[in-house]
Image (cartoon, grey):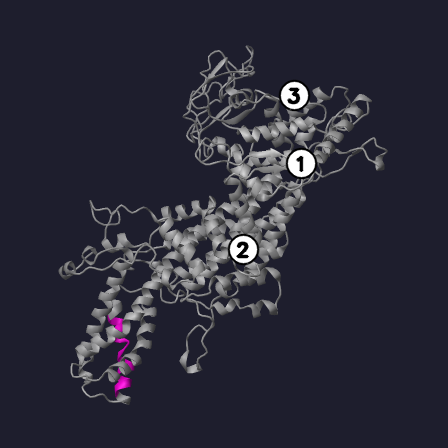
């Protein structure tokens, strides 16, 4: 993948994932694993739902299998000949000066010392206490345990998708024929994935050099059925009773067995269940995916429920599983895939922001990119320019006018719109490069030692290479760059959002994008504040350089280590925060587009409102030509006054707006006197126009929000006689570009996130009137719905439809 292909690769990724969700199998070859394949396996575990879930199969390519078998034969021959091989006859890392002739016991000792991770809640309280043990303060503590500050389980264990992704990446690496493991081991890892057995792995503890040792040790332990570790497994249906394979060393005769611990965030230290002779499995267990319940069991029972036979490991295989970058690469893959989508979405939201702010499409003209040919800038500008094609709100170019005609008017769009390609372009390039780095990593061998199969270059005996492919700094650098890119993208979203909300900058929209009266509807002020919070957090995350934070580990053997998994974890946090910001921004944009459309309809009605008011004030006025000339004279001042007075309550505002007509009207009359136009009637004209403007704005608000005039808070009795036709769920559609309209309508129609303000107009916001509640959800509920649609890929599919057919991406 090249930087030129960020958008097209994103489109390909979304389509490829959908193909796996509709039945296409995923074939593991060791060299063709894609980001979408990782997402398919990680995010869509086996289920019993109506939806098909991706199935994994190993390649049937005999050359690949032969290479793996030859690599394994090298290890077996070295062991048989008594050759000393690192990790087979020696200790590990700084302890590699020890020797043994028992590679199986050595492997078990490797797993034992790497099972050092912390997973809460623990069942350490079931450890037998020595009779002579001295009582400690904790054992004598009669006080209740406090509630934890964070959820113990989810804050100390990796989410199952991370582990499924790592299991896939590790299997892909091991089958390449450089690790000296049996083909059966790769098959067993694939079986775990296809049957949904997912080890519980500690969140922390890896320095990502020599690979993710501790994290991967829990996968190895599950494969061999170690009862000291736990795994998620799809709950059988109907419920069944499972005989344990063996008892855990933590069993007590007084324990109350259950299939799964209580993972409530208010439980301080609920013991995990010991293994017992029979283990009843309840269907009422925590869900880890969107399809069905999974049960948490000791590894032997989890394997038994899934119908999997444990696989005893052979020489070198313990180290073969552990000594790799699979967790770092897996989490990085999931993160960079999501970040790439956020990058494209950032350009889409910029285009929609241009419409909301009646900006200029010309800022993204191809000529600009040709003058400064950074590829990311060119492609982001091309995308935005194409998305705006056909918009009624975005001007093709700023209209040239005389100096006297635009005095005091901002000559060009603000930076957040006009320089968006120059801001997003470098992020497009960095995200594309990061995706390239991660794709290379997941199709690499990251072991030590590496096993070179027999060839002419090594006299057909095979070669053991001691090196450092487990050093994952390439991933750390990529994730550090992605995190910075997300901070930049988020900053652009925030600035666009806050300018749209701010009446001093939003070119005539109501303050805070209020749908009702501005004095009792503060609309998206809270969203603006929340967005500032998200952006502040992103700034902190983006400023991190995890790679330079490493410290020496493991007897100073791991004197430099990449911390790649830590960087990936922080980057995932940045991705989640950016998603919150994008969802907030999209909701704000949709509200702004509705208000812009409402304002456009008000502007379209002005000539008739002015004409009718002129005839009311000057009944002897004659001639359409005369009336038209007077209307034309006052409209510019009227529109300017409407833009400048959005912070005022409607009645006060419209009197002020109508008053702005006096000077241009008097000027027009004094320049070209009109028969029947008496200046003494000007107050009547102002009053008549103000009333009509107020009535029209109220009518439009009702039409856009789906509220009848009689239901408006404080409505006059005459309002009972009037009705308005609702404009529907997506009233701004007719003004938008065909491509941007798709996302706007998805939010309004498909997701059902409606224009805000109906409750404020009716006055039935909870707490406004005792005993009266309109039943609307919170503004945050709407943002949450959009956020979920970003995270689950629905908005991504809409975006793909929007960008398809654009040439040059």
> Where's residue 133, x and y in %?
55, 13
- Residue 542 in sight from this viewpoint: no
Q: Are marks 2 and 3 in contact (CB under 8 Å)?
A: no
* Mark earlier in primary sequence (2, 1): 1
Q: Which residue is mark 3?
A: 312
* Crowd rating for badge 1 (residues with CA inside 10 Å; few <14, some 14–19, many 20+): many
* Mark earlier in primary sequence (3, 1): 1
> Which is the main secondary structure of the residues drawn in magenta?
helix
* Mark earlier in primary sequence (2, 3): 3
* Crowd rating for badge 3 (residues with CA inside 10 Å; few <14, some 14–19, many 20+): some
Q: Is residue 587 above or below residue 236?
A: below
Residue 290 in which image quadrant: top left
Using the image as rendered, state which of residue 715 and residue 538 is in the foreground: 715
Q: Which residue is mark 1?
A: 173
> Where's residue 397, x and y in %?
47, 72
> Where's residue 513, x and y in %?
35, 59
Using the image as rendered, state which of residue 786 and residue 732 is in the foreground: 732
Residue 665 is covered by the magenta coloring: yes
Q: Which residue is mark 2?
A: 488
- Find the magenta span and give its range: 655-669
Determine whether the residue tagged by mark 3 lies in a helix, strand or loop: loop
Report the side of 561 relative to 408 (left or right). Answer: right
Determine whether the residue tagged by mark 2 lies in a helix, strand or loop: helix
- Residue 442 in sight from this viewpoint: yes
């Amino acid at each position: 993948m090249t930087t030129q292909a960020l958008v097209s690769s994103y489109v390909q990724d979304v389509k490829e994932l959908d193909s796996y969700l509709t039945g296409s199998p995923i074939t593991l070859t060791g060299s063709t694993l894609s980001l979408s394949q990782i997402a398919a396996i990680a995010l869509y575990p086996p289920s019993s739902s109506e939806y098909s879930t991706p199935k994994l199969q190993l390649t049937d390519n005999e050359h690949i299998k032969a290479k793996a078998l030859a690599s394994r034969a090298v290890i077996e021959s070295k062991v048989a000949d008594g050759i000393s091989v690192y990790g087979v006859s020696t200790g590990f890392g700084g302890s590699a000066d020890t020797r043994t002739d028992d590679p199986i016991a050595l492997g078990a000792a490797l797993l034992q010392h790497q099972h050092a991770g912390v997973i809460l809640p623990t069942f350490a309280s079931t450890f037998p206490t020595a009779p002579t043990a001295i009582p400690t303060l904790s054992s004598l503590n009669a006080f209740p345990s406090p509630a934890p500050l964070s959820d113990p389980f989810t804050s100390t264990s990796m989410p199952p998708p991370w582990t499924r992704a790592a299991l896939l990446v590790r299997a892909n690496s091991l089958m390449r024929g450089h690790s000296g493991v049996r083909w059966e081991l790769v098959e067993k890892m694939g079986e775990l994935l296809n049957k949904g057995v997912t080890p519980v792995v500690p969140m922390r503890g890896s320095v990502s050099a020599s690979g993710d040792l501790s994290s991967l040790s829990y996968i190895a332990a599950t494969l061999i059925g170690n009862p000291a570790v736990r795994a998620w497994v799809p709950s059988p249906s109907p419920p069944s009773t499972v005989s344990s394979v063996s008892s855990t060393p933590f069993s007590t005769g007084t324990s109350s067995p259950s299939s799964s611990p209580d993972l409530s965030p208010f439980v301080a230290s609920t013991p995990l269940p010991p293994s017992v002779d029979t283990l009843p499995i309840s269907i009422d267990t925590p869900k880890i995916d969107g399809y069905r319940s999974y049960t948490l069991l000791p590894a032997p029972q989890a394997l038994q429920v899934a119908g999997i036979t444990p696989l005893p490991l052979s020489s070198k295989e313990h180290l073969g599983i552990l000594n790799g970058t699979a967790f770092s690469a897996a989490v990085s893959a999931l993160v960079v895939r999501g970040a790439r989508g956020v990058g494209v979405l950032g350009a889409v939201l910029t285009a929609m922001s241009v419409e909301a702010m009646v900006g200029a499409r010309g800022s993204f003209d191809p000529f600009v990119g040709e003058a400064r040919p950074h590829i990311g800038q060119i492609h982001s500008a091309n995308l935005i320019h194409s998305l705006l094609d056909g918009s009624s709100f975005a001007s093709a170019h700023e209209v040239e006018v005389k100096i006297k005609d635009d005095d005091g008017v901002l000559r060009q769009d603000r930076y957040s719109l006009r320089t968006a390609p120059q801001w997003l372009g470098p992020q497009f390039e960095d995200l594309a490069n990061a995706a390239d780095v991660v794709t290379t990593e997941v199709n690499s061998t990251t072991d030590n030692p590496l096993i070179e199969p027999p060839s002419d270059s090594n006299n057909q005996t095979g070669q053991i290479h001691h090196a450092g492919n487990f050093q994952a700094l390439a991933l750390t650098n990529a994730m550090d760059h992605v995190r910075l890119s997300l901070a930049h993208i988020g900053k652009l979203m925030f600035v666009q959002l806050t300018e749209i909300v701010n009446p001093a900058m939003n070119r005539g929209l109501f303050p805070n994008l209020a749908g009702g009266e501005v004095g009792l509807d503060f609309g998206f002020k809270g969203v603006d504040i929340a967005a500032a919070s998200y952006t502040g957090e992103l700034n902190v995350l983006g400023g991190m350089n995890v790679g330079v934070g490493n410290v020496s580990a493991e007897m100073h053997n791991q004197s430099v280590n990449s911390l790649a998994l830590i960087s990936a974890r922080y980057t995932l946090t940045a991705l989640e925060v950016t998603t919150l910001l994008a969802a907030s921004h999209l909701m704000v944009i949709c509200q702004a587009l509705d208000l812009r459309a409402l304002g456009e309809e008000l502007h379209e009605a002005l000539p008739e409102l002015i004409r009718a008011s002129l005839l009311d004030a000057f009944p002897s006025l004659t001639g359409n030509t005369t009336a038209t000339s007077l209307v034309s004279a006052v409209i510019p001042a009227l529109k300017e006054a409407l833009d400048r007075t959005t912070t005022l309550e409607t009645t006060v505002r419209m009197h002020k707006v109508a008053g702005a007509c006096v000077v241009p009207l008097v000027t027009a009359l004094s320049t070209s006197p009109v028969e029947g136009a008496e200046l003494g009637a000007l107050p009547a004209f102002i009053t008549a126009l103000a009333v009509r403007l107020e009535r029209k704005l109220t009518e439009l608000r009702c039409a856009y929000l789906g509220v009848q005039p009689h239901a408006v808070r404080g409505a006059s009795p005459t309002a009972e006689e009037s009705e308005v036709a609702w404009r529907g769920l997506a009233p701004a559609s007719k003004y938008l570009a065909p491509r941007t309209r798709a996302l706007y309508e998805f939010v309004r129609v498909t997701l059902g996130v409606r224009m805000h303000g109906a409750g404020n107009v009716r006055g039935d916001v909870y707490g406004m009137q005792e005993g009266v509640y309109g039943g609307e959800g919170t503004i945050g509920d709407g943002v949450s719905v959009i956020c979920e649609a970003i995270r689950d890929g629905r908005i991504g599919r809409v975006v793909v439809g929007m960008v398809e057919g654009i040439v040059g991406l």
